[in-house]
Amino acid sequence: MCVGVPMQVISIEGDQALTEVDGVKREASLMLLDQEVKVGDFVIVHAGFAISKLDEEDAKATLELMREAFAPELMG
């Protein structure tokens, strides 16, 4: 299963962003996006690439659903 994760951009250097969610930090390339991305924005990160930008409300709602879906008590 492939999962893209909403992550918040905490720094940008060239086409590389450092992103974070729940204390987990990952580098992500911004080269696939045709929109400007700034520190504080949310992006969907998949396989090391930011593949889309989304607003904070949508990012938080998606993260909440992912937390519920992947909760340990549901994973068996």
Image (spheres, rainbow, N blue to C red):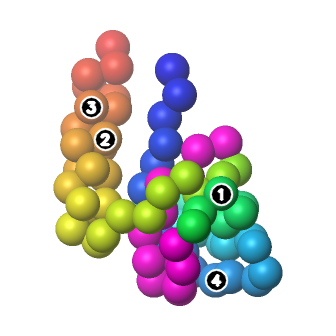
The residue indicated by pointer 2 is 66
Where residue 40 appears, as percent x and y from the top left, is 45, 83
Give the mark, 2 or 4, whose residue is nearer the N terminus.
Answer: 4
Q: Is residue 3 visible to us here?
A: yes
- Name the image quarter holding residue 29: bottom right
Q: Residue at x 78, y 81 (%)?
A: 14
Residue type, numbered disc 3:
Ala
Disc 3 and disc 2 in contact, CB within 8 angstroms: yes
**Residue at left 48%, top 35%?**
3
**Which SS class for mark 1?**
loop
Instruction: Please state, as top left, top right, bottom left or bottom right, where the C terminus lies in the image.
Output: top left
Whether residue 25 is visible, yes or no, is no
SS under mark 2: helix
Position in image of residue 20 (x %, y %): 53, 67
Q: Amino acid at mark 2?
A: Met
Above or below, comparing residue 43 to residue 66 in the picture: below
Label 4 sits on a secondary structure element that is: strand
Residue that label 4 marks? 11
Q: Which residues are magenta?
A: 35-47
The residue singled out by tag 1 in the image is 32
Tell me the distance, in whole angstroms, between the alpha carbons under discs 3 and 4: 29 Å
Depth check, front residue: 42 or 25: 42
Helix, strand or loop for the magenta stretch, by majority: loop
